[in-house]
Image: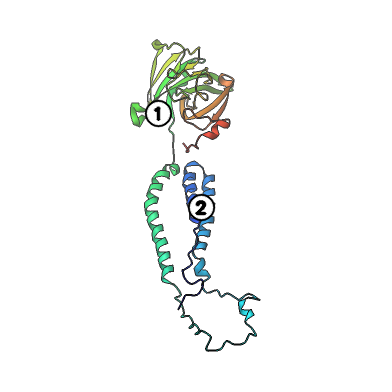
Amino acid sequence: MEPQQGQGKPHLPPPSLWPVGFAIGIVCILVGLIVSWAAVAVGAGITVLFGFLWVRDVTGDYRHRDVGIEPAVGGPESATEGAPPVPADRGEAAMPPPEPGERFPRSVFLEGATLGLGSVIAGIVTVPIVGFSIAPIFQHQHHDEIDLGPIDNFKEGEFVTTTFLRDPSAGEISRRTAYIRNNGFVGNQPSFTVLSNRCAHLGCPVQPNGPLFEQRKLEEKTKAGEVTLIPTLPAGGFGCPCHGGQYDQEGNRTAGPPVRALDRYEFYIRSGRLTLGKTYSVSKVVGTGASAKIKKYRLAGPGQHVDGIEQWFYPLQPPS
């Protein structure tokens, strides 16, 4: 018997974009765990939306399997009402009634089993990788304060080239240099300018444009290790020997390729001793010394703009 019209080939579902959207949502969540919680929220919304649409699309045939189709008024069935019966010698044999189908067809079971097994395998593979990637974000990232010694070691109004161990447990590889000036007091609080020697162009070590007074060198033993203090007179500010970047005594860029001012260290006074905290980036400093107004930003890499329209051309930085 010839197959009836529309029964020659099984109807295949059209390709769906819902899995693509679901994957995009997962990517947004993973990126957001590194970048910001707002991106995590957006990714979760996308994942839930496209996941729901995907499941709804996949289970559509099963949900509509037992739904009958009522003939439309005025359709072919209604057109035969009142027509004379077809003679038996001209008519065709009636189709046998359909056998009752399976309540849970094998194809549906295999489909569900495949999706479930694929999810389990994906979880086994990705969970360890994602865990190692994002675990540091949820750990307490404590930046130990670096004790540089008594504030009396820093003469008011004078820059001191200070070297210290950023991470004493790592040894000399963590030795850093900062240019520190005692600005005197603001009210009853000591004020210091603490400039990083990392050039804001490519990270080369910046040097003072003036003499170092080695004969007045002071070495201080602290809990963080040995701290070396050498007074300097950067009358011409600070300069980078690599590509000619120039900065004034507040760290503002004055010439050359750097895109911003020198980075600075947070500082604290603990029992009359100067201690350093985290490093942060600076776009510009208005004023000088204790009265300076600092435009502070989260620490950025060398060559990266932190303000203006240029900052939009750089990727988001992970939390530090």
Residue depth check, mark 2 versus mark 1: number of the one nearer the observer? 2
Tell me if residue 208 comes above or below residue 141 in the rendering: above
Query: Circle 1 sits in a helix, a strand or a loop, which is it?
Result: loop
Residue drawn at x 50%, y 59% as measured from the top left: 54
Q: Is residue 123 left or right of residue 294?
A: left
Q: Quadrant location of residue 241?
A: top left
Q: Which residue is mark 1?
A: 166
Residue denoted by label 2 = 21
**Which quadrant is the N terminus positioned in?**
bottom left
The amino acid type, in three-letter code, at marker 1 is Arg
Q: Position of residue 268 (x, y in %)?
A: 49, 27
Rendering colour mode:
rainbow
Q: Is residue 15 above or below residue 277?
A: below
* Residue drawn where x is 56% and y is 19% of the image: 289
Where does residue 176 sit, x and y in percent of width and height? 40, 24
State the count of labels.
2
Depth order, front residue of 38/151 = 38
Question: In which quadrant of the rendered view does residue 292 lie?
Answer: top right
Q: For marks 2 and 1, give the CA distance.
A: 45 Å
Residue at (40, 28) in percent of width and height: 166
Q: Residue 52: x and y, percent?
A: 52, 59
The tag earlier along the polypeptide, 2 or 1, is 2
Q: Is residue 77 above or below residue 88?
A: above
